[in-house]
Amino acid sequence: MAAITFPPGFLWGASTAAYQIEGAIHADGRGPCVWDTYTAAGRIQDGSSAAVACDHYHRWPEDVALLKDAGFNAYRFSIAWPRILPTGTGAVNAAGLDFYDRLVDAVLEAGIRPMACLYHWDLPQPLEDRGGWQSREIVGPFADYARIVTARLADRVKDWMMLNEPNVVATHGYGTGEHAPGHQFGEAGILKALHHQNLAQGAALRAIAAEHSGLTLGTVINLQPCRAEDDKPENAAAAVRWDAVWNRVALDGVLKGEFPAVLAPYAEGIVQPGDLEAVRYPIDLLGINYYSRMTMKHEAGRLFDVWWGDAHCDRWTAMAWPVQPDGLYDLLAHFRDDYGNPAVFVAENGAAYDDVVEADGRIHDAERVAFLRDHVAAVGRALADGCNVKGYLCWSLLDNFEWGFGLSKRFGIVRVDYDTLARTPKDSYRFLSTVAKSGVVEA
């Protein structure tokens, strides 16, 4: 096997999301969010909830110790909007800010770079009641929230990501109803949610930049190269349309101030004069969440007349997602060749598998180790070929509440026993720890 070496200062770590790990959904003044409402309506597949999840809200010292012991130098976490502003606007909940104060101080004391994400899907329910991401009225509240959080933490947190995966929020939350808030508003609903997230992001970036200097400002997008199932023209056209929805609205919005022309027939009245200038912003760092490619085909009657095609793949995760590390290399090369080689980092990459706890209590998750090894190697090859990649953060540190799947799907490099909340590092944790400490992966 060939050794791939990473440069000094390369970021190694893990990502988490507040709603998926914190629990304590009624503690210390936190308000309700759309996922609380969605869960209460019985929409979670396994009937579980995030009321406790990993109880990170109380067990965060243990989790920070896991990051430190792994030798990680970066940690991307999200801040829960309803902990800071229980109704989405108005009075600030001091206890919520205090919690993130303590967390940030501990992360820094452990020698780890805190990378904060302002929005990882936990929209305060009162804002959803006023239209949520379907309404332009959400732009101001998000910018105000960004000001409040950075006023408290930007003296220590230098990396700020605005959104996490706006395409997933829009498509699953407002298009198919598979995620909170559970709406099936179709194509226009998806594009409204995407565009309004873009507008809110632009307002937040400007609000933060106006009040702070020396910060690294960015965002995080789930990006998946789209290709057609075969060479049929209708399938090629379907792949182009879905690439525009899934990748280009969010990506070209912030980087280029553009809205995909191919989507114009679906977007009447959504993009107003001046919007694209408000959306565009010269971010310092782009987070890329990569899990697989997307293989698409034409199917009339589906959203945008697009549906899943045959991925022509022989490896699959427990989420029934294809394993395609070559897609990550291609994605990074695409930024080098077509976007001017901006600074990017892998903000999420990982896989759910059906882990088995052995008699000795250990978890030998060989499939996840292979997944991580192949994707880290793809990043290494991209670096060697001139791609401006700053780091690799796995998804996720902990097994957690996997949205509509509840507690049934495990992405963590650390196992969480949901009965006892005990943490057990898996073989994948030890693998990434070795890579992080050595800066070398055998490919």
Image: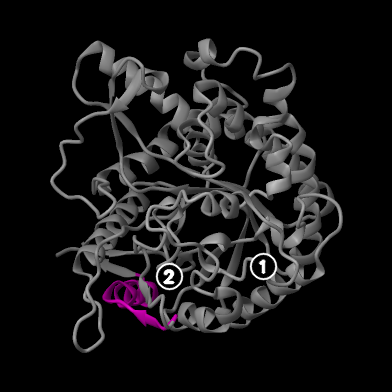
Q: Is residue 128 above or below residue 51?
A: above
Q: CA distance from mark 1 to mark 2?
A: 22 Å
The answer to whether residue 280 is seen in the rendering is no
Picture coordinates of residue 96 (x, y %)?
Answer: 74, 68
Picture coordinates of residue 360 (x, y %)?
Answer: 21, 89
The answer to whether residue 396 is seen in the rendering is yes
Q: Residues within 10 Å of mark 1 (few under 14, many from 20)?
A: few
Amino acid carrying label 2: it is Leu
**How does the figure colour the protein chain or chains?**
one colour
**Residue 424 covered by magenta stretch:** yes
The residue lying toward the viewer, choosing from 152 and 1, is 152
Element assignment for label 2: loop
Picture coordinates of residue 204 (x, y %)?
Answer: 74, 44
Q: Is residue 101 above or below residue 117?
A: below
Picture coordinates of residue 370 (x, y %)?
Answer: 21, 62
Mark 2 lies on residue: 398
For the record, the magenta segment spans: 421-439
Horizontal side of 313 relative to 221 (left or right) equals left
Q: Residue furthest bottom?
A: 360
Image quadrant of residue 93?
bottom right
Mark 1 lies on residue: 26
Image quadrant of residue 333?
top left
